[in-house]
Image (spheres, rainbow, N blue to C red):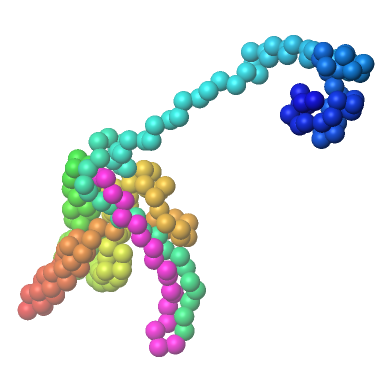
Amino acid sequence: MTCSKCGGKYAAHFTACVHCGAPRTGPAAAAAGVPEAPAPPRISAPAPKPVPAEFRSVPMAVAPPPEPACPCCGGAPGRGTIRVETRENKGSTFGFRPGTRYLVRWVDVPLVCAACARQIEIRRYLADALCLAPLVAAFVGLVATDSKAFLWILLLYAVFLLKWSWGLSYVWADAILYGGWLESSLTRFAPPGDRNTIRFPAGLWHCFMRIGGAPALLVALLAAVAGAFG
């Protein structure tokens, strides 16, 4: 006999396959007097219930990657960059050079368009002139009134301008003319740092203009004072 399940060979007097145990079926089983095994009951699964529309999964389209844009105005990108700088206070130091230590971090934000780069550069030149305006006003007040108060104002502001222009090349004039505009659009690119320390340094050229403007006004002041006493 040949097993209809596993295909194995066995003698006819066996009522089931000696290899897999499957019972004999068909005409050969009836001729041998082996009762045919009953067929297994057929179980029909219930039809699935329809899924409500609010629970059906809808395939979502993959969003395309964002197009490059100018970080300042959101328009077409350019080749310019703008530096974003932050400071982190590292505590005071004592000794030969007492003072406060800062950790300065900076990031150059790319893709600034030509129009924004030109506008920022113009505003920086205006800031160069504006930060020297208190020196001019104090000089005019000194010449007009001959009061030593204006001389002290002139000297103190000159020291302030020399210190902060060389250290950060970013003073109150920069914050007024372009700092607020850049901070509102470039804060997301700022590196970690203390709060309210975001700066947009103007570069060495503007730094030299400001540092050179202060000594020029001081020389003019000394010449005017010497001429008055002479």
Between 179 and 41, the one lying in front of the other is: 41
Query: Residue 119, percent across and down?
Result: 20, 44
Horizontal relation, residue 138 to residue 171: left or right: left
Foreground of the two, 78 or 182: 78
| Residue displayed at 45% across by 65% down | 88
Determine the image quadrant of residue 53: top right
Residue at the extreme bottom of the image, as rendered: 96
Residue 116, by quadrant, is: top left
Residue in the image at 39% along x and 63% along y: 105
Res 226 visible: yes
Residue 17 versus residue 190 in the image, above or below: above
Is residue 199 among the parts visible in the rendering? Answer: no
Q: Is residue 58 left or right of residue 96?
A: right
| Whole-percent x, y for residue 129 in the image | 18, 55
Dominant secondary-structure state across the stretch colored magenta: strand
- Residue toward you, 29 or 173: 29
**Residue 141 shown left or right of residue 8 in the figure:** left
Residue occupying the point 27% across, 65% down: 165
> Relative to residue 217, is residue 94 drawn left or right?
right
Give the quarter of the figure containing the C terminus. Answer: bottom left
Give the quarter of the figure containing the N terminus.
top right
Residue 113: x %, y % from top left: 22, 42
Residue numbers of the magenta segment: 95-112
Residue 33 part of the magenta-drawn span: no
Q: Residue 206 placed where, x, y %?
A: 19, 60
Say if 209 sits above or below 6 in the image.
Answer: below
At 22% from the left and 48% from the top, the residue drawn is 80
Indicate the quadrant where residue 102 lies. Answer: bottom left
Instruction: Give the answer, above or below, for where 198 lies relative to 27.
Output: below
